[in-house]
Amino acid sequence: MTESKGLFIGLLLLSLVVVGVLVSGIWYLNFYGFNLLSYGVLLIISLVLSVVSLILVLGIIGILLTIRLQRPIKSLVIPIKLVIAYFLPVVIHLGAFLGFDKEEIQSSFIKMSNQLINPEDIEVNAQDILILLPHCIQLADCNFRVTSDLDNCQRCGRCQVDDLIGLQKKYGLNLAIATGGTLARKIIKETRPKAIIAVACERDLSTGIQDVYPMPVMGVVNLRPNGPCVNTGVEMEKIEKAVEKLIFKEPIGEKIVES
Ligand code: SF4
């Protein structure tokens, strides 16, 4: 397990320790202190925190086993989903408190999440794959509005929308540009893909992966040579590699998301 991916898992384990200490402390108070009223309140808090701890333990075990065995552990999909959906903000806050960079934690989460995908388990043809792009990949001064219809692109080659359309046509993929989370969800609903290759910044990718899990989403962090949200780019070879791995069934390594 590499250090970058390990950061997220390490912080998850630390969250578990924090919750575990809390639960133990409250259970201790249940047995050795307080009057009947506070006892009842503490008992409820203890039970809730115990369930949270159990979910966290099962989710972490599920994540580690999935990465180790390179296949999903069906019985642990729900705790993994809960951990991915609800613990990322906790982990980010904990990491920030410990001095880690928020983007670094999100990037670690994306790498870990990519490792949870095994193409062997996804029966997917090219037409089942959706490549989802952020609108900032289009050149800001382009006069053709491609967010509503990619066919409006004149393929002048001034931005990577041209390359991505080329890749779409080469494999017969679905390609769409989303201007935000709501539109992304709408596109996914309409396209009904079996796998998504999403390009975005660390924050949007983390949120998107959380939103649609257990739908397999391979996250590719975008390039931002001009700062965030303007004339961004993507490493085309990472996208093509992800497409080929999904179609030709090779285990997916984190090379896809290394930037
Ligand atoms: S390739 Fe050219 S026409 Fe197409 S979106 Fe980029 S700048 Fe606009």
Image (cartoon, rainbow, N blue to C red):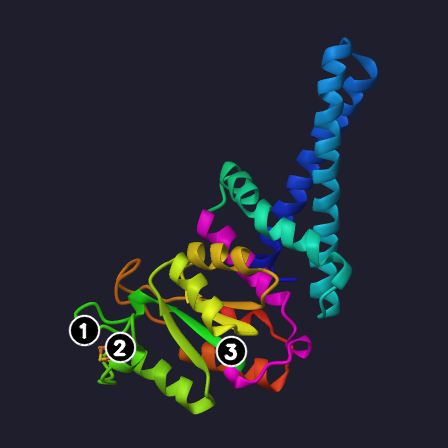
- Mark carried by residue 234: none
Q: CA distance from mark 1 to mark 3?
A: 27 Å
Which residue, as the protein is rendered here, is positioned at the far right? 31
Disc 2 Cβ-to-ligand 1 distance below 8 Å? yes
Q: Decide whether the magenta segment is chiefly helix, strand or loop.
A: helix
Q: Is residue 109 magenta?
A: yes
Q: Are dots 2 and 1 in contact, CB under 8 Å?
A: yes
How far apart marks 2 and 1 lie (CA) works out to 9 Å
- Mark linked to residue 142: 1
Q: Foreground mark, 2 or 1?
A: 1
Front disc: 1 or 3: 3
Determine which of the numbered discs, if any, sits on residue 129 in the image.
Answer: 3
Which label's residue is closer to the chain start, 2 or 1?
A: 1
Report the span colored magenta: 102-127
Q: Nearer the viewer, residue 17 or 153?
A: 153
Residue 121, by quadrant, is bottom right
The spot of residue 83 in percent (x, y) is: 64, 49
Q: What residue did someone put label 2 on?
A: 159
Looking at the rendering, the quadrant in which ligand 1 lies is: bottom left
